[in-house]
């Protein structure tokens, strides 16, 4: 069943998700994703899909969006400044990425700002190991088992 999902559905949903993941159409795509999972697993329409996502180790649309944003941020680390590059004060959040102040809501909802926000909400030990593949697989397992 998992092969059916990854062969036909996953590639379509995850295609450039960091561009359209924050749009208003994402809720409709998520509902379609749940409907397809129910068809594949032959569950009733009123049953919860949360356990099915966990058992099949499939990320929900929102989990896939979070994972893609973190991958974008980690792979393009040179585009981002940390807070200690902006100022030299030793604060609690000096290792976080600097969140630029923007006025355009289109840029504010884009991949750059959203990636910074999601990355800053990660635990400190995950941020420290962000370039390590083991860390990314741990993050992926966390997103499998905690449906968003």
Image (cartoon, helix red, strand yellow):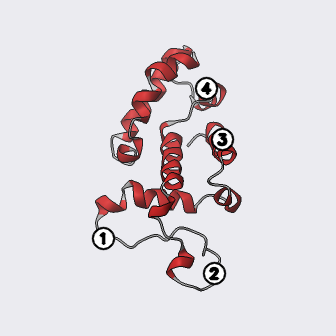
Say if 117 sits above or below 29 in the image.
below
Return the residue nearer the eye: 77 or 110. 77
Mark 1 sits on what residue? 103
- Report crowding for label 4: few under 14, some 14 to 19, many 20 or more residues within 10 A (C-alpha): some
- Report crowding for label 3: few under 14, some 14 to 19, many 20 or more residues within 10 A (C-alpha): few
The answer to whether residue 140 is visible is yes
The first of marks 2 and 1 along the sequence is: 2
Front: mark 3 or 2: 3
Say if 130 sits above or below 138 in the image.
below
The first of marks 3 and 4 along the sequence is: 4
* In the displayed structure image, the side of residue 44 where residue 132 appears, left or right: right
**How far across and down, in percent of the image, does residue 88 sit?**
57, 85
Q: Residues under labels 2 and 4: Cα distance?
A: 42 Å
The first of marks 1 and 4 along the sequence is: 4
Q: Residue at x 57, y 69 (%)?
A: 96
- Report crowding for label 1: few under 14, some 14 to 19, many 20 or more residues within 10 A (C-alpha): few
- Report crowding for label 2: few under 14, some 14 to 19, many 20 or more residues within 10 A (C-alpha): few
Mark 4 sits on what residue? 52
Q: Residues under labels 3 and 4: Cα distance?
A: 20 Å
Mark 2 sits on what residue? 91
Q: Residue 137 — which label?
A: 3
Quarter of the image where one finds residue 51: top right
């Amino acid at each position: 069943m998992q092969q059916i999902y990854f062969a036909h559905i996953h590639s379509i949903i995850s295609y450039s998700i960091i561009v359209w993941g924050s749009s208003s159409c994402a809720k409709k795509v998520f509902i379609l994703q749940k409907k397809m999972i129910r068809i594949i697993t032959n569950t009733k329409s009123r049953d919860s899909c949360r356990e099915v996502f966990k058992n099949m180790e499939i990320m929900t649309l929102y989990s896939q969006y979070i994972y893609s944003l973190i991958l974008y941020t980690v792979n393009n680390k040179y585009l981002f400044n940390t807070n200690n590059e902006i100022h030299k004060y030793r604060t609690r959040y000096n290792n976080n990425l600097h969140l630029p102040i923007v006025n355009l809501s289109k840029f504010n909802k884009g991949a750059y700002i959203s990636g910074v926000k999601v990355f800053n909400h990660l635990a400190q030990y995950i941020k420290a190991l962000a370039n390590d593949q083991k860390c990314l697989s741990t993050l992926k397992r966390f997103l499998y088992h905690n449906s968003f």
